[in-house]
Amino acid sequence: MAWRLPWPLPAVLVWGLAWLIYLGGAWLGLAPAAALICALLAGVLLSLAGASGWRRLIMAAGFPVSLLASGAAVIPNLAWLLMLAVFLLLYPFKAWRDAPLFPTPAGALDGLPAQVCLPAHVWVLDAGCGLGDGLRALRAAYPQVQLHGLEWSWPLRALCALRCRWARVRQGDIWQADWKPYAMVYLFQRPESMARAAAKAGAEMVDGAWLVSLEFPVTAQLADVELPLADGRSLWAYRLPFAQTRPASRQA
């Protein structure tokens, strides 16, 4: 769930909590490296709820940067290596080509059932489910379907499974998984990923299935459904097979 507080208050709170954990750990007698790792881990995990990539980076980086600037601690090399290991667990190299953690806002999909009807018990996939915000939005919109989530980062997958016990959440690569069983695949990816997603959907998904994207359209296709959202973004839905191709722009 994204922070609902005005910016930059979420960042200040995360930094303050990280400092509190660091100083509290030292007061309790933890080794400096252990206190540092606990504070860094707390900052990284809390930053995942940031509303954008830049805000998540600022929230996660504020504590270590301020610690270095203050000179309050001499940080062992091992601690920095452990911090890097935690980061790579959350965002493995293979996941960098896809979107960072983009949480789906609550209620973002509420208007979709009026335009895209799904029968009971069909399978719906949140491709790149992160912490489960997309799965929760899908459940609110389609309580009658069977929800599946796929996430490459195994710590995020584990946290998502805890938050969404009613969904089947697996660790895996969304581009290697077979999309054929799903009546709908929902994405909140990078705009650069949408052409690849459309090609995969066209090759694997059955006629009548839906590809749904928050914010980023498939630029080569005309959407069957476009739903403007209150925050200025749009929800795009494409029914298979793709029948409408957006005309290429002419060069002057």
Image: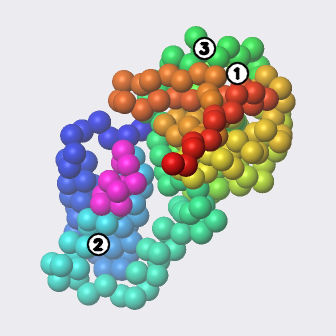
- Residue 203 in the image: x percent, y percent? 83, 42
Instruction: Determine contact: label 2, label 1, CB under 8 Å.
Output: no
Distance in Å between CA atoms under marks 3 and 2: 47 Å
Which of the marked residues, 3 or 1, is nearer the chain's N terminus? 3
Which of the marked residues, 3 or 2, is nearer the chain's N terminus? 2
Residue type at the position of mark 2: Pro
Q: Identify which residue is drawn at 67% across, 14% down.
A: 117
Left or right of 96 on screen, residue 61: left
Magenta stretch in the rendered image: 50-59
Name which quarter of the figure residue 173 lies in.
bottom right
The residue pinned by badge 2 equals: 64
The residue pinned by badge 1 equals: 145
Query: Between residues 237 and 25, which one lies in front from this camera angle?
Result: 237
Local packing at callout 3 (Cα closer than 10 Å; few below 14, some 14-19, many 20+) is few
- Residue 150 in the image: x percent, y percent? 67, 46
Task: Residue 42: tell me if it is visible.
Answer: no
Name which quarter of the figure residue 72 lies in.
bottom left
Residue type at the position of mark 1: Val
Q: Identify which residue is drawn at 21% across, 40% down.
A: 6
Distance in Å between CA atoms under marks 2 and 1: 43 Å
Q: Give me the disc on residue 206.
A: none
Image depth: mark 3 or mark 1 in front: 3
